[in-house]
Image (cartoon, rainbow, N blue to C red):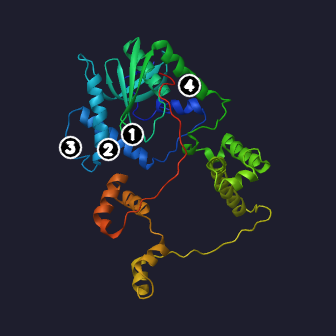
Amino acid sequence: MKDAAVVDKKHHELSPSQFDIWAECPCYESSPVVGTAAAEGTRQHGYMEQVLAGEESDKYDDMSAGDKANVEWFCDLVRMHCPATAKIETEQKVVATDGFDILYSGTADAITGPIIYDYKSDREWRSHYYQMAAYAYALMTMRGLKEVRAIVGYGRMRKLSDYTFKREDAERATKMIIAARKDPDRKPRVCDYCAWCHRRNECEAHFEMNAAAVMQSDSGMVLNRADCIAAMNDPMAMGRVLNVISKVESWCEMMRKRAKEMAIEGNVPSGYMLKEQQNKKLTDPVGVYSRLSMIITPQEFNAALHIKVTELREAIARKEKVSAASAKRMLDELCGDLYSVETVAMLRKQKQNGENDHA
C-alpha cells in the first residue's frame, strides 16, 4: 500500500477539482495552458495561506486591495467556524485509497478538525458539490471521521455553499464520478464547461450540437425568416436569434480553421481556392507617426492602428511576469493621462444558478 503521507505534490490524474466538471461531461480535458484568471486565483490562494498562518511579507504587495479583501473575508470565515479545540491547517493534501492503491488526491485550502474549507475566486457561482464530497471522503478515510462539513467561500461575491457529508454519501458521490471518468466507453456531453475544454474542437458532441443547430436553423425549426425580421424590434425574437448565433459561432470558426488546414494540406474545399497574401506590420509606430504627423491627427493614427488598452495590459503582464491586476496598475500609472475612459454597454446571456441543488 502506498503511504498516504508521502504523496507527490503534482495533481493526481483524478483531481477532485475536476469532479464537478466530469459530472457534466466525463470526457472533459482541462487546458495545459494556465490562463490569467487561474494564475490570479493561485496568487490569491498563496495570500490566503499567508494570512491564515499569521505571516507577513512583501510578496503580495502588488495584489489589488479588492483581491486582498476577498481573501481576508474568506480567512475570517475560516476563523469564525474553526472549533475551539482545532488548529487551522492550510494547503493540506488529502488522499483516498481503496486499501491498496491511491484512488485520487487533492489539496484542501484549509482544514479545522472535521471541517474543510475551499476558497473560490470565481466571478460567478458554480456547484462544487462533488469536489467537496471527494475531499470529505478522503479526510474521513484518513482520520476515521464519520461526518465532515465542507464550506466553499466565494470571495468576490461574499457568498458561501455549506455541505455536510456522511461517509456513505460522500463515498457514493465520489465513486460515481470516478467510474464515469474511467469508463472506456464514456461519451462526451455538451455542457457549460465546453468553452474551457482542451478537446472542444475535436469533440463529437460539440460538433453534433452545432451542426444540428445549423441544420435546424436552415429548416426553420429553431430560427425562421419571421424571427429574423421581427428580431429588429421584438426582444423575444431577438433572444431566439442570439441563442442560435451563440450555438453556431464557435462551430463556424472551428470549421473555417479546419477548412484552411485542409487547403494547406492540398485538400482545397470545393468552390474555394487557397490564396497567399502579404500582411505588412509596423515595426516602429513612433517613427511612422513622426513622418505622418503633418498629414493625420493622433486620433486618426490611433484609429488606424487599433491600439487596445487590454492588449497593452496583456503585453505588460507577459513581459514583467505579473498578474493582470498589476499590469493594469502599471499601465495606469505610466499612461493613465494619455487615454480616456469610455463606458461601453455589454449584452450577456443570463445564467440561472441555484445553491441548494445538492445541499
| Label 1–label 2 contact, CB within 8 A | yes
Question: Callout 1, which amino acid?
Answer: Ser
Question: In what element is the residue under mark 1?
Answer: loop
Question: Callout 2, which amino acid?
Answer: Asp
Question: In what element is the residue under mark 4?
Answer: helix
Question: In what element is the residue under mark 2?
Answer: helix
On the image, numbered disc 1 is attached to which residue?
121
On the image, numbered disc 2 is attached to which residue?
67
Specify the quadrant of the image occupied by residue 73: top left
Would you say 52 lies left or right of 306 here?
Answer: left
Task: Find the distance from the CA under tag 2 to the CA under tag 3.
Answer: 16 Å
Task: Find the distance from the CA under tag 1 to the CA under tag 3.
Answer: 22 Å
**Residue 26: horizontal and vertical position, in percent?**
60, 32
The first of marks 1 and 3 along the sequence is: 3
On the image, numbered disc 4 is attached to which residue?
178
The residue that appears at 57% across and 21% down in the rendered structure is 176
Taking 167 as reference, is 13 above or below it?
below
Question: Callout 4, which amino acid?
Answer: Ile
How many badges with numbers are in the image? 4
Question: Callout 3, which amino acid?
Answer: Ser
The residue that appears at 23% across and 16% down in the rendered structure is 85
Task: Find the distance from the CA under tag 4 to the CA under tag 1.
Answer: 26 Å
The first of marks 1 and 2 along the sequence is: 2
Task: Find the distance from the CA under tag 1 to the CA under tag 2.
Answer: 9 Å
| Label 4–label 1 contact, CB within 8 A | no
**Disc sitting over residue 332 in the figure:** none
The first of marks 4 and 3 along the sequence is: 3
**Disc sitting over residue 57 in the figure:** 3
